[in-house]
Image (tube, rainbow, N blue to C red):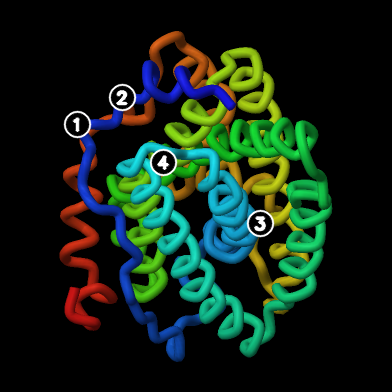
Amino acid sequence: MAESAGATRRRYRTEEHAINARDVHFDFGSVPMHYIPNEVFATHIVNVMHLVLPEGERAMAKCLAEAMPYIDDERLREEVAGFVGQESMHASSHAGAREHLQSIGLDVDSMVRTFSWFVDRILGDHGLSGRAKEEWLKERLGLFAGMEHYTAVIGEWMLENDKLAELGMDPTMLDLVKWHGAEEVEHRSVVYDAYMYVDGSYARKARTAVVASATLLTTFLLSSVYLYAKDPEPDKGRMWPVQFVSATVRGIVPNFATFFTELPRYLRPGFHPSQLGPMDSALRYLAHSPAARATGH
């Protein structure tokens, strides 16, 4: 595979620090259905971040594990192993939130099962071998690198956003999404570096970035609308498009224009995820997160 690509194009030395899975625990027992008060649709947009997207992260972690035999650089191998561990912890942490919301009347399991089935059928290894297996691995790495760009940008937005706290968002859910966002920022370079090491084709990067952007945008919109429709509350306020526009304008949810405006930056020659901005706030939050402190981190 592309041995020289990784050696000449990786630029993550300034971000070198150990990426490790953190053993955190969240108690969802008292979390209400609408944990952002008076913001039904915004709550369900946030639900997509921590109920639906982890299924994609599970597939991403599996893809990175498959790429390990093709990565000889020990430092990058350590980062990939840490990334896989963090994504596994994300899945287990968000499973608790999903089970709680299901128990209080929100049908999330059927949607998560459907999405999981879809991800496995589309982004699985399909039992390929030889050259076809390698090419499909490169393609998936390109897709996941593009997706990780958006999760890092959204993670950075979550860390910097004060609106949710001002609105009185449930502290457990606020900690969960900020902790997840912080780890997305922390490991923002790993999948990109793995892709550049294993392949590094700009044409593939551009093609898969467009697909990744369209896929995430569609997933957010369809999943949010589905959860809104399944919400058992008789009075859900104004129609969801009105709530959506209002929440976006007031900065309660990320601006979905991000899925278009970030493409030029990602596709700029010489781009690297480390250019997104300093990760100081992410590491600071991970050190002081209530869930991390509760387990001694």
Horizontal side of residue 137 vs 294, given as left or right: right
* Residue of label 4: 190
Q: Amino acid at mark 4?
A: Val
Q: Residue at x 72, y 41 (%)?
A: 218
Q: Amino acid at mark 3?
A: Arg
Q: Earlier in the sequence, mark 4 or mark 1?
A: 1
Q: Earlier in the sequence, mark 3 or mark 4?
A: 4
In 3D space, how far apart are the residues under numbered discs 4 and 1 (Cα atoms)? 13 Å
Q: Residue at x 70, y 30 (%)?
A: 211
Residue 281 in percent (x, y) is at 20, 47
Dots 2, 1 in contact, CB < 8 A = yes
- Position of the N terminus by quadrant: top right
Q: What secondary structure is marked by label 1?
A: helix
Residue 190 in percent (x, y) is at 41, 41
The answer to whether residue 256 of the structure is visible from this angle is yes
Q: Amino acid at mark 1?
A: Thr
The quadrant holding residue 106 is: bottom right
Horizontal side of residue 202 vs 110, given as left or right: left
* Residue of label 2: 11
In 3D space, how far apart are the residues under numbered discs 2 and 3 (Cα atoms)? 48 Å
In 3D space, how far apart are the residues under numbered discs 2 and 4 (Cα atoms)? 11 Å
Judge whether 41 appears above or below 198 on screen.
Answer: below
- Position of the C terminus by quadrant: bottom left
* Residue of label 1: 14
* Residue of label 3: 238
In 3D space, how far apart are the residues under numbered discs 3 and 4 (Cα atoms)? 41 Å
Q: Earlier in the sequence, mark 2 or mark 4?
A: 2
Task: State the residue in front, 29 or 137.
Answer: 137
Q: What secondary structure is marked by label 3?
A: loop
Of labels 3 and 4, the one closer to you:
4
